[in-house]
Image (cartoon, rainbow, N blue to C red):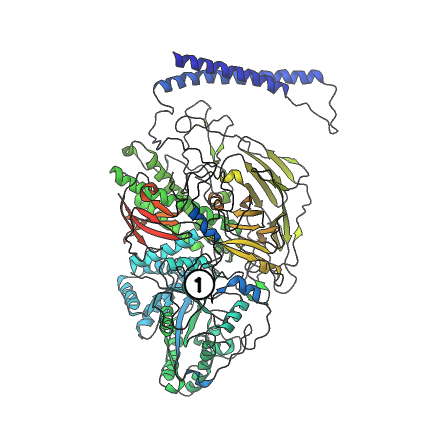
Amino acid sequence: MKLSRQFTVFGIAIFCVVVFSLYLMLDHIDHSKNPNGERIQNGQLGILQDKIDHLERLLAENNEIIANIRDSVINLRETVKDGKMFPEGNMSQGNVELLPPAPALLPIHSEDCQFAAQTYSKAADGVQMLDVYDLLSFDNPDGGVWKQGFDISYQDNEWDNEPLQVFVVPHSHNDPGWLKTFDDYYRDQTQHILNNMVVKLHEDSRRKMIWSEISYFSKWWDSIDEQKRDAVRRLIESGQLEVATGGWVMPDEASSHYFALIDQLVEGHQWLEINLGVKPKTGWAVDPFGHTPTHAYLLRQAGLSNMLIQRVHYSVKKHFASQKTLEFFWRQNWDQDSSSDILCHMMPFYSYDVPHTCGPDPKICCQFDFKRLPGGRISCPWRIPPQAITDNNIQERVQTLLDQYRKKSKLFRTNVLLAPLGDDFRYAEAVEWDQQFENYQKLFDYMNSHPELHVQAQFGTISDYFEALRKSTGMDPVGMNVGQLALPVLSGDFFTYADRDDHYWSGYFTSRPFYKRLDRVLESHLRAAEVLYSLTLANIQKYGQPSDYPAVDNYKLLTEARRNLGLFQHHDAITGTGKDWVVVDYGTRLFHSILNVKRVIVSSAHWLVLKDKPAYYHDPSNPFLQMVKAAESVAKKCFIKMLNFFAVPRLLVVYNPTEQARTSMVTVYVTTPKVRVLNALGHVVRAQVSAVWNDASHANISCLQKMRLKEDDAEFLVKVEFVWYGTTSNKDKSGAYLFLPDKEATIYSPSQPPVVRVTKGLLFSEVTTTFTQITHTLRLYNIHGVEGQSVELCNTVDIRGEINHEIAMRITSDLNSKDRFFTDLNGYQVQPRKTMAKLPLQANFYPMTSMVYLQDSSARLSLLTAQSLGAASLKSGQLEVIMDRRLNQDDNRGLGQGVLDNKITANSFRLLLEKRMSGFLEFWKFPAETHLRHKKVTYAHQGCIHLIKKNTLKTEGGGPSEQAALILHRKGFDCGFSNRNTGLLCSTTRGKIRLEKLLTDLKVKSITPVSLSLMHTHNSDADPQEISLKPMEIRTYRLQLS
């Protein structure tokens, strides 16, 4: 009875509200105005008639609403009597307790603040790249035969006591897509290289070869018979064939996010472990356009001891060569000891091809590339061809080659010399194997049989070289101690790369931004699908229910998605430096994989939300759940059809793919504004219904001008505008790789006034300004947490009608940042930058994988990005981000075309302004960046530690196993910034996590600490139920759930 009275009162209250609303609506009906703002004096009767008609319509509508309210109250009363808030259904509500409100002040342990207080790493005798850039003049004098270097001399008796050891390392660089698609390259060249390799290496046990790209190797492996597979295994066991790095591809190191770098490395290493039992020891990266310490760290964590890099600024190479520091221990900026060190070799000359690898004179070295013998399809550009080695010329040929070897060795600290022998897609024909190996073997035999030459030369693998190098210095075979002859310790990165003159490779940081965004969409979906899939398999085991859940089919879809994502990390894919049709092939793979992992998400979520597990069914043509938000890069909206406001409600399952419980805005499109949102308990959730606009009005309005902090009302100048870059009038112009602007940027001034629309609401307000080539949206959220603390910016760019133009967003502030700013490296760590006046404008642009920021003593201004782009701070207090590039010509780096396949691209950002008290990357910028990457769809744990991925491992048959990989990352942060209203429900725990809190409702049968890619098992006496990580540490565990 009491309940009935309550509903009666509730109904009367609603009726009163409706009547009062009618009055307000009538009172606020707008009056027409003429263009001069004067009220129309006549037509009063017409206005009155319009009011009456409008009132009648409102009364009719509200009569219907009141009738529906009456029916709804009756239904609601019956539901409450039955103890149900939702219609009867087979839906598990999981833990329906509401999350506690996030604390206003995030609890932070004092020990967790010590990380930011550390200075950047630099050993006593070490090298910090920031110091090197200050030191160099970046001039480019003619160095003689070594154009970008200097003359090298030596004494003939220098090797009398210790002979020169030369390792000639045959290799074939196979791009998984560039001028041809991955499949076309495989069909035309790669399969023949690998087939010839098996035959030709078996002909002579002294021959060696290295291979890097597992994407190709696995495709070839699937096509060969067991006899040939056994032959490959014998080559590996004998040391004739080495797999270097072993990733799915040789990844780009500027635009790739560390999630994808790890993913492609794990995919390659797991394939090797299952099929060949191989554990790579050395990294090989001859073609990425600049190098990041993030990749060095990942290789070290995967168990590799050595690595090689090639594309480094020519002035840096010259400096390192003069100092004999081309070999060094590469240490992370944040590492205070040697735990992250990896031994690194930097190739000293222009390229990795044969003319630039035997010594400083390419004219001479080209004569020892025997593929260029007269009569072949390629020749030496210096017009002095190679000579086949005969008894008549061998003495002279040996002296000529040995002179180059000796000169090259003078750039290093040991008598162990590396001489790579290869180029792009080499050894595709059997005749080349014979030309190279037979002629070089004659040279080696002569050298080794003449002790007066004091040289020992042989074919080798890259690990053969590093083993000899370590032995010569007294180093541990795999450890990182410096040995008898100390090698320097280096920290920092090798961006931005220039190969000659002012030709800086900063253009590819932005080229083809549509696909760079699509990459991040697949990353986000794949990570979410992997976690859900693993949990579903564990859940099925827990309930022990027979199920037609498509575990094997879903695993194949996930594997394909991982491999397509890995393929796109290739240094001619995510960089945007492939032919048009190759880019389309990459994009098609990404898009199909997004659709496929959505199927995995849908079928996995279906199982997890069901109460009655045996009722599960799998029907791909009629899925139980549907993904309602399409990939943002595709700019397509999916609407939830609402049949009737008071009909059976549509159930929306929201999945938080991040590792933290969080308060966040969820946006869906519906077909009617008459909706309300309830949670699993039937409580009303705050929601805002806003119109989806089709048109707007012209207005004279600029973009963002100022920002005010909520905490203390402090106001800062923060101005957003857009600028154009052209390309130089010189012979060499901007292209897919190079950024060669004609001058400083000019302000973007469209000929037509912008179209503006304004949306205001309880939860968010936004202003959208539409220019000719840009639609710029600025959105403010009125919620706690990351979104409420920052300004969301979205720029939809369309420059398809332009000629040789690049468009950038410029943010100007009153922060006194001088010439300093910071960019992230692969979303993993932060690298300080210095804008240098001695360098051309294009040299001061750096890769921005996830963020860029500048600061002074009072504040920090950060721009977080959902896609990789190029960024700079050309003036104090200013940030610039290149958003798209349209270029009509090739830049003479081999692509043979411009960039003219532009698409309408939505670039998403968050602009964050904070009061600053000290400096390193502040704590909750990481959640902000994570929100940008994982905006769409509870897997919560303590400690504010990031779950990189949790994926099910495969069996030898290629299906899902009962084991899973758990990869965690403890992020370093700065306590010198506000920790209020972060929206996070965690607290810092000095890097310690309890497994029972990490994996709620799941029991761990076994947990084993392993290397990053699960190749090596680590012995540990620690409590297996507690995980402890150092700041910035990434660690992997092999799990078996029960």
Expressed as whole percent of the image width and height from the top left, the position of residue 326 reads 47, 70
Classify mark 1: residues with Cα within 10 Å, few (<14), some (14-19) or many (20+).
many
Q: Is residue 335 left or right of residue 701?
A: left
Image quadrant in which you'd find residue 445:
bottom left
Identify residue type, mark 1.
Trp
Q: Nearer the viewer, residue 944 or 681?
A: 944
Expressed as whole percent of the image width and height from the top left, the position of residue 463 reads 36, 68
Expressed as whole percent of the image width and height from the top left, the position of residue 740 reads 61, 60
Quarter of the rendering occupied by the C terminus: top left
Please, which residue is most extreme toward the front here? 110
Q: Residue at x 60, y 20 (%)?
A: 25
Expressed as whole percent of the image width and height from the top left, the position of residue 7 reads 43, 15
Question: Label 1: which residue?
Answer: 330
Asked if 314 appears above or below 1026 in the picture, the reply is: below
Q: Nearer the viewer, residue 580 or 707?
A: 707
* Residue 303 shows in the view: yes
